[in-house]
Image: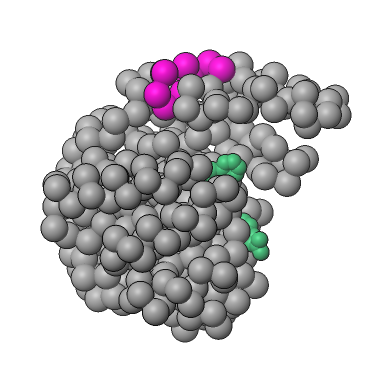
Amino acid sequence: MKTRITELLGIQYPVIQGGMAWVANAQLAAHVSKAGGLGLIGAANAPAEWVRSQIREAREITDLPVGVNVMLLSEHADEVAQVIIEEKVPVVTTGAGNPAKYMQGWKEANVKVIPVVASVALAKMMQRAGADAVVAEGMESGGHIGEATTMTLVPQVVNAVDIPVIAAGGVGDGRGMAAALMLGADAVQIGTRFVVAKECTVSQEYKNRIIAAKDIDSVITGRKNGHPIRSLRNQMTREYLEMEKNDVPFEEMEHLTLGALRRAVVEGDVKMGTVMAGQIAGLIAKEQTCEEIIQELVAETKEIYQKRAEIIL
Ligand code: TUI
């Protein structure tokens, strides 16, 4: 496949793996890149030296480009931004904020910068600041989300900027990928489906919870504190939402979410941990290798492009 994103990044297929906190490590990222997409190491709240070691570990697995996602709310974001330059990381995505203060340094170091945005306003600002592309992420996504849906956000961002747009949120198979391309996107970013990749090292309980998920199994917590997070419904989200409804002070609810993503990902506690996943979890039925996932996505997308042309008389 050939789009402005495959050309920009030198990758075979317009498929980018989400830079998921605690999930997107060197193993997953390297295997996505090896399969022809772009893998990303999710820096999340991790210290910069962990990120450096992950970058080096990915390079032991593949010579193909592997990027880093910088979570801008992290207290380590400044040092991670520097490690990206020192390690000559070819591409960076950012999330949960405005990466303007790092832009000049990254551009000077020839790092391709792809901010994740949840609004047209931020997309335009990022283009002005020199971004090479943007990820337009709808609220179908797992984790920290904005307000707009993918279906509505992507075409509006495509109209607002000239740089390539990558669609994220709700894409889990070739139908979603073809639809995103039809909205004007030059690639898709996929998270949830890669969580159940064979090469993904999350707990088996986390994968099983995604595979068992139904269409309406995700909920949004944290709306009141300004950091809305989509995750799969469980005992933790029920207790949290009940406290939110009763206006319990934020500090008294924190114990529920503190370290909760780690509890689910590492310890397999999918009852009291945070099982971040997108709304497309209900579509995801089995574990596959990164290679199988990407080959299936591409084959389905190609088939749709050919078959659906029939409806035009
Ligand atoms: O960042 C994500 N998804 C994430 S980050 C994350 S870890 C986390 N932990 C605790 C609290 C918050 C996050 C889990 N999932 N996606 C990209 C994304 N960025 N979605 C929405 C946004 C966003 C929202 C507001 C980007 C910018 C923004 O405002 C920009 C500004 O001007 O501050």
Task: Say which quarter of the image contains residue 310.
Answer: bottom left
Viewer can see residue 294: no
Q: Is residue 44 above or below residue 264?
A: below
Q: Position of residue 144 (x, y in %)?
A: 58, 46
Q: How is the image coloured?
A: one colour
Residue at left 21%, top 65%? 11
Q: Position of residue 164 (x, y in %)?
A: 41, 75
Q: Position of residue 48 (x, y in %)?
A: 42, 48
* Figure quadrant of the N terminus: bottom left
In the image, 281: left or right of 14? right
Q: Is residue 204 above or below residue 152?
A: above
Residue at left 50%, top 34%? 276
Residue at left 29%, top 75%? 8
Tell me which segment is drawn in magenta.
Answer: 264-272
Q: Residue furthest right?
A: 247
Q: Tell me if residue 269 is in the magenta stretch.
A: yes
Q: Nearer the viewer, residue 62 or 32?
A: 62
Q: Would you say the magenta stretch is mainly helix, strand or loop?
A: loop
Q: Position of residue 27 (x, y in %)?
A: 24, 40
Q: Is residue 223 above or below residue 168?
A: above
Residue at left 44%, top 54%? 80
Viewer can see residue 134: yes
Q: Tell me if residue 45 is in the magenta stretch.
A: no
* Figure quadrant of the C terminus: bottom left
Task: Say which quarter of the image contains residue 265.
Answer: top left
Q: Nearer the viewer, residue 104 or 286?
A: 104
